[in-house]
């Protein structure tokens, strides 16, 4: 590859990283050693594993968010109140997560669009859920 195309490749790469915060986050995460020893979580509790990059969206118990399941009850049968997470089926009910900016919370719900590396955090109102938006965060399993 000649110098001209090499320089163009560098410029395009830098531009892409500057424009897309998600790309920057993913690029930085690839550089993290995921086999590092567990870190201490809140109140000195030990994390079960390394933090994992997750797409974290938000919902509330309204009809816009939950459709016909907007009855205030989670998929596990618990009331939809407090710090609750909807997670994919591979994360068991009762799993405790540390979601930055949201807090220490429990998986008590599921969702049709919640697959792979996605989570949905519960808020009491639709406005609060909209304010959260979609965030890409390093989430830890605490217990």
Image: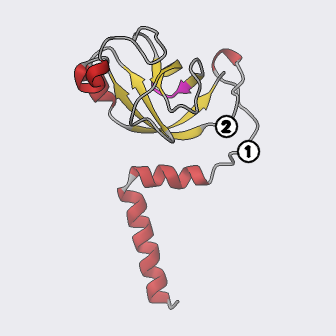
Residue at left offset 69%, top offset 48%: 33
Q: Where is residue 66? Give x, y as percent.
A: 30, 23
Residue 111 in the image: above or below residue 10: above
Provide the secondary structure element on which disc 1 rests: loop
Provide the secondary structure element on which disc 2 rests: loop
Q: Where is residue 109? Give x, y as percent.
A: 46, 21
Q: Where is residue 55? Give x, y as percent.
A: 45, 39
The front one of 65 and 21 is 65
- Residue occupied by mark 2: 50
Question: Magenta residues?
Answer: 98-102
The front one of 70 and 33 is 70
Tags 2 and 1 in contact by the CB under 8 Å rule?
Answer: yes
Q: Where is residue 27? Give x, y as percent.
A: 52, 55
Residue 20 in the image: above or below residue 137: below
Residue 50 in the image: above or below residue 128: below
Residue at left offset 49%, top offset 29%: 87
Q: Is residue 69 magenta?
A: no
The front one of 2 and 137 is 137
Q: Can you tell which mark lies on residue 35?
A: 1
C-alpha span from label 2 to label 1: 7 Å
Choose the circle earlier in sequence order: 2 or 1.
1
The C terminus lies in quadrant: top right
The front one of 104 and 73 is 73
Which quadrant would residue 23 be assigned to in this image?
bottom left
Residue lying at the far front of the rendered structure: 68
Majority SS type along the magenta span:
loop
The number of callouts visible is 2
Residue at left offset 69%, top offset 27%: 47
């Amino acid at each position: 590859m000649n110098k001209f195309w090499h320089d163009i490749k560098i410029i395009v790469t830098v531009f892409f990283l500057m424009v897309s915060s998600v790309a920057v986050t993913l690029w930085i995460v690839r550089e993290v050693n995921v086999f590092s020893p567990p870190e201490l979580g809140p109140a000195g509790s030990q994390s079960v594993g390394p933090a994992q990059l997750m797409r974290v969206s938000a919902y509330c118990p309204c009809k816009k968010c939950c459709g016909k399941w907007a009855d205030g009850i989670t998929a596990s049968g618990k009331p939809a109140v407090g710090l609750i997470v909807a997670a994919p089926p591979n994360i068991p009910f009762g799993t405790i997560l540390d979601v930055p900016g949201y807090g220490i919370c429990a998986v008590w719900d599921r969702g049709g669009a919640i697959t792979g590396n996605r989570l949905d955090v519960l808020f009491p109102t639709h406005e609060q859920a909209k304010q959260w938006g979609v965030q890409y965060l390093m989430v830890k399993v605490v217990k």
